[in-house]
Each structure stands twice: as C-alpha cells, then as structure tokens.
Amino acid sequence: MGFDTQAIHAGEEPDFDGHPSGDVVVPIHLSSTFARRDVDEPTGGFEYSRSGNPTRFALEKKLAAIEGARYGLAFSSGLAAETTLCLSLLKAGDHVVAFDDLYGGTRRLFTRVFQENYGIGFSYADARDPENIKAAIRKDTKIIWLESPTNPLLRLCDIRAIAGIAHDAGARVVVDNTFASPYFQQPIGLGADVVVHSTTKYINGHSDSIGGALVTSDEELFRKLRFHQNTAGGILSPFDSFLVSRGIKTLALRMKRHEKNALAVAEFLSGHAKVAAVYYPGLASHPQHALARKQMKGFSGMLSVELKGGEAETRKFLRHLHLFALAESLGGVESLIEHPATMTHASIPPSERKKVGISDTLVRISVGIENADDLLADLDQALGTI
Ligand code: PLP
C-alpha cells in the first residue's frame, strides 16, 4: 500500500467487533483505567492507560506503518522518547558515538544527565564521513546516534554505510528522522535499528502538540522499549494521540508543499546579496546533494542560512519579519525562523558550537505551506533592512 493510504488507514480500520458503532476515526479514549469481568485478565485487552490506551495504540500502529516498520511507541515528547530509548539500551560504563551536529536538547540530555549522572560515555564525530564514526567506535560502544539531515546545519550521513559499520561492531543504529519525516526518508529500510521522532514537528504538523515516537522492527527491542515506556511513564495522552493521528493523515500533502516552498526560498536566498551561504539538501550546490537523492525521496522544508554582516544585522533581520514567526520548533504549517546560537542550541557551549559550525549569523528556517510569493516578499523586505 502507498504511504498516503497507510497514513490514513493504518491503525484505524473500522472494527465492528471492538467498536460496534463503526467509527472511521478512532475515538479519544480518555479513561485512565479499564474494568474487567474477572481478576485473571483484562476483558477488553486494556488495564490502565499508562500501559496501554486504544487511541494511543491506534497511533502507534500508524507510526510503525508510515516508517515501514513493525512496531511504534508514542511518548509525551521527543526527549521523553529519547530518554526511554537510552534507559532501555544503556547502562553505566557504556559508550555512544553521536553525530556532532545534533539538536541541542539531545546533546544536553546526553551530557548533563546520562554522562554526568550515570557514567555513560559520549563521543561526537562528523558523520558526513562514515570513517569518522568507525574511528570513534570502542569495544563498549552500544549505540551510533544519528540525525540526517541534522539540526541545524542540514548535514547528511550515509545511513546504510554507517549501519554496516555499526552492526559489524555489535552496536545499534538510532536515527532521529524528525527533519526528513517518514514521507521523505525511512531509516529502518536503510538498516537503522530504531527511528526517533519529535512528533511535535512534521508528523503532527500543526504546532499544537508536544510528542515523540520510537519505531523499530526488532521484536525483542520493542518489548524492552514497551517495558521502559510503561515503567518510566512518559506516554502520550489520548487527546494528543488523536491530534497526531489526525496530523499524519495529511503528512504526504503537507510535505510536498513544504518541499516546494523550501526550494523556492532556498533558490531566492542563494541569489541574494545579503546572504553568505544557504544550506538546503535540495540545492545542487549542497555538498551532499547526491547522497540526499540516494537515500531520501525528497528534501523536506528545513534550511539554514548564513547572513552577511554580524550578529546585530542578523537580529535586525529577524525582528523585521512579519510572516515568519521568530520561534523555536519547526515542521508546522506556518513558517518559523530562529537563531540557533541563542535559541535551540544555546545549551551547547560556545566553543563546541564553533567547532561544529553554528555561528552567530546562522538562522534556521522552517518553511511553512503558505503562498510562496508571500514568503519571498517577507524575506526580501526584512533583508532590505540590514
Ligand atoms: N529531535 C530533533 C531533531 C528536534 O528538533 C527536537 C526538538 O526540537 C527534538 C528531537 C526534541 O523533541 P521535543 O521538543 O518534542 O521533546
């Protein structure tokens, strides 16, 4: 079945036995607990909503289907999903190799919690070259943690090549697929063991729910993750599960439009006198454009731009935009813009930011699905002020 068909039907097939009313949309099951006839087993399969909830289970099936995987789990945020994954796979003394360009909150979780409090080691490597990952792997390496494309520099890594290296070394590969969305990239098919999402972003798509997901096809790993999801408790609520399910139904349509608009913005900014560099994997000038074409079905709606001048000019440009809201987050229908050095990646020490390439004149743009001409006009007038 096609992606768009799965996005609409998976997890929500009318069930005349379970739901005699024939709902075509799974209801929002708000009940925190479920009655049973006898003590021995739950009559309808559910006992308590942290362990399992019909609305969340429907979403979890849909998440697995759209990633081309067998199992999905929904969490109260992307970071709750990441935390649960680390709790499931790591113990004191273990080691993780991570892409050096990662969402700032992920790095903060690794450093401030798992490294400082639990004695887990983290090494960061530039995964654009798989050999750098290979060189960073140690005997005790349990996870290779990747984003592709990365937040905020839109760098890619060859997921298939790195999965080969990781599996030879007995490590698992985790890919944060938030920027690409499953519509444009399915890491499980490229050899990843687990996919992570902040569903807050493209998957929900309307900037009105915080959520996260883990997806895998490995049954044993899934059982571990389900155990830790229930034990640590970071589950997605029934209402948010409904919202995310609803968002997924238009993911294919939205992603096509995000990409079309992002390409228009990237091309416009590439030719602008006030812009020093544009990072967008869909541009032929992106150093990893060929890899993007190979492992992705499209280029998504995220790009970053290096402005000419200094931080003062960058701040002035951001202040003068009308349609692009100056806000953290991404992947919603509305265009957003932000300054990674002081916003999403402020928790990374300045020296580390510099090493990775996050400058004070870098701005990250989440291109929405508005009229592209209106977006270009807004960018043009704001650039005209600096
Ligand atoms: N992964 C990426 C790539 C992100 O951009 C974010 C948030 O911005 C997260 C994970 C964390 O997700 P959440 O904010 O839903 O906890």
Image: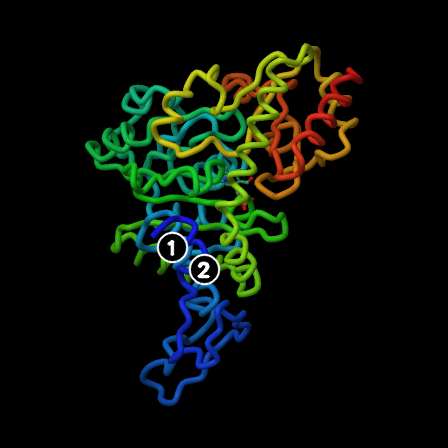
Q: Residue at 80% across / 18% down in the picture?
A: 385
Q: Residue at 55% across / 22% down in the picture?
A: 353
In the image, is 219 to the left or to the right of 237?
A: left
Where does the image place residue 268, in percent across and percent down from the top left? 63, 20
Q: 105 or 219: which is nearer to us?
A: 219
Q: Residue at 47% across / 70% down in the picture?
A: 49
Q: Residue furthest left?
A: 168
Name the residue tied to disc 1: 72
- Residues at discs 1 and 2 in contact (Cβ within 8 Å): yes
Q: Residue furthest bottom?
A: 37
Q: Describe the element under mark 2 as helix, strand or loop.
A: helix
Label 2 Cα neighbours within 10 Å, binned few <14 / some 14-19 / many ≥20: many
In the image, is 344 to the left or to the right of 124?
A: right
Where does the image place residue 306, in percent across and percent down from the top left? 61, 17
Q: Is residue 292 above or below residue 368?
A: above
Q: Residue at 63% across / 52% down in the picture?
A: 208
Q: Earlier in the sequence, mark 1 or mark 2?
A: 2
Name the residue tied to disc 2: 59
Label 1 Cα neighbours within 10 Å, binned few <14 / some 14-19 / many ≥20: many
Residue type, label 2: Leu
Q: Describe the element under mark 1 as helix, strand or loop.
A: strand
Q: Is residue 363 above or below residue 114?
A: above
Q: Quadrant of residue 100?
A: top left
Q: Quadrant of residue 51?
A: bottom left
Q: 130 or 63: which is nearer to us?
A: 63
Query: CA–CA distance between discs 1 and 2?
Result: 8 Å
Q: How is the image coloured?
A: rainbow
Where does the image place residue 93, in percent across and percent down from the top left? 32, 38
